[in-house]
Image (spheres, grey):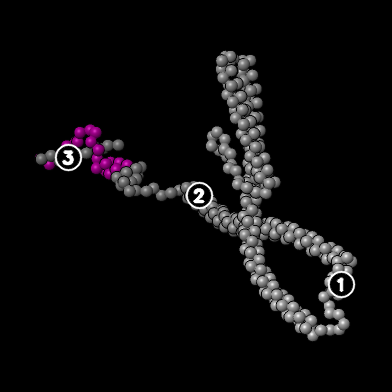
Amino acid sequence: MFGKVFKKTEDGNAAAAPPGTPSPSDTTSLGGVAAATTPGASDPDFVPPPDAVSLVQQDIEEGTRGDLEKQVREKDANISSLEKHRLEKHQELAALQKELEEERLRQMKESILHRIEVERLKRQTKAVEERLEALEKDMQDKDAIYEYANLIKGVAPKGGVDSQYVMKLQSQLAKAVKKMDATAHQMAQVEQSCEEVVNSLKKEISEIVEDRCRTELELRKQLELLEEQKEEMQAEYDDRIKENQKELERLKEKVSVETSVADLEKELEETEQKLEQLNNIHEMQERTIEELKETLENGGGEAPSTPTDENGEE
């Protein structure tokens, strides 16, 4: 590898270099090999060119990422559209519920007012029938008619018509007409005052009926809510009972394997306490529902508060 290198001495003679000293050409060739084997070793910013496999993988990853981003955008758009549609349906449902409550309130109010009007007409018809019976009885009373005829005959002048008698009758007739006019005026005033009283009473009755209907609707809503809560709590109680039964089975198996009597009694007491709490809450719900039903049957009243269990849950 290394050849002999002759150096010229001071006297011009060539002398052999010590063995192991590389020649310039060898040094040049070695440097070229090192540079070829380690390209960019002296350049920290050198980036090797990518091969074909990495380029294909990069293209596949970019295409997959683009497809995923497109799917995500489409799903976001679908979610936004569904959320908007849900909000619209929720608003429509709220409007329909409000309209339904108003319609139910109006129907209940009209039903109560119609019932009151029917009772009034029945009483009025009964009074008119009684007056008609009394009038027919008076018209068919022959004794009273005979007495009136005798009274008129006794007052009438004998042997012809007296002018003073006629004037007296005219005067009495004028007084009677005047009294009738005064009575008619008084009757008109009484009717007007009675009409005002009746209108005010109708207004008060309408307000009372509306309050009653609102209270009844509120009680019905509370009853429906309590029924739903009862069903949910019943399902929850059933699940808890199943869990407790499983726990009891586990305890039995545990007793058969390895369990002390004290631990078993403690777990049994906890299970019995849980069952007792569930029974108490169930009885409280039943009493509340019965109170609401009795309140509705009695025609309304103050709505009872919703019961809560020991954990503060309704």
Answer whether residue 74 is visible to the viewer in this image: no
Q: Classify the position of the C terminus by image quarter.
A: top right
Q: Residue at the location (86% across, 75% down)?
A: 153
Q: Are marks 2 and 3 in contact (CB under 8 Å)?
A: no
How far across and how far down the image is residue 303, in percent? 60, 46
Q: Pointer 3: what residue?
A: 7
Q: Residue at the location (83% across, 66% down)?
A: 135
Which numbered marker is on residue 149? 1
Say few, some or many: other residues with alpha carbon within 10 Å of mark 3 (under 14 / 14 to 19 / 20 or more).
few
User: In terms of depth relative to the viewer, which is nearer, 197 or 304?
Assistant: 197
Residue type at the position of mark 3: Lys
Mark 1 or mark 2: name the one nearer the start of the chain: 2
Residue type at the position of mark 1: Ala
Disc 1 element: helix
Q: CA distance from mark 1 to mark 2?
A: 127 Å
Say few, some or many: other residues with alpha carbon within 10 Å of mark 2 (under 14 / 14 to 19 / 20 or more).
few
Which numbered marker is on residue 61? 2
Q: CA distance from mark 2 to mark 3?
A: 64 Å
How far across and how far down the image is residue 100, in percent? 66, 57
Q: Residue at the location (64% across, 59% down)?
A: 205
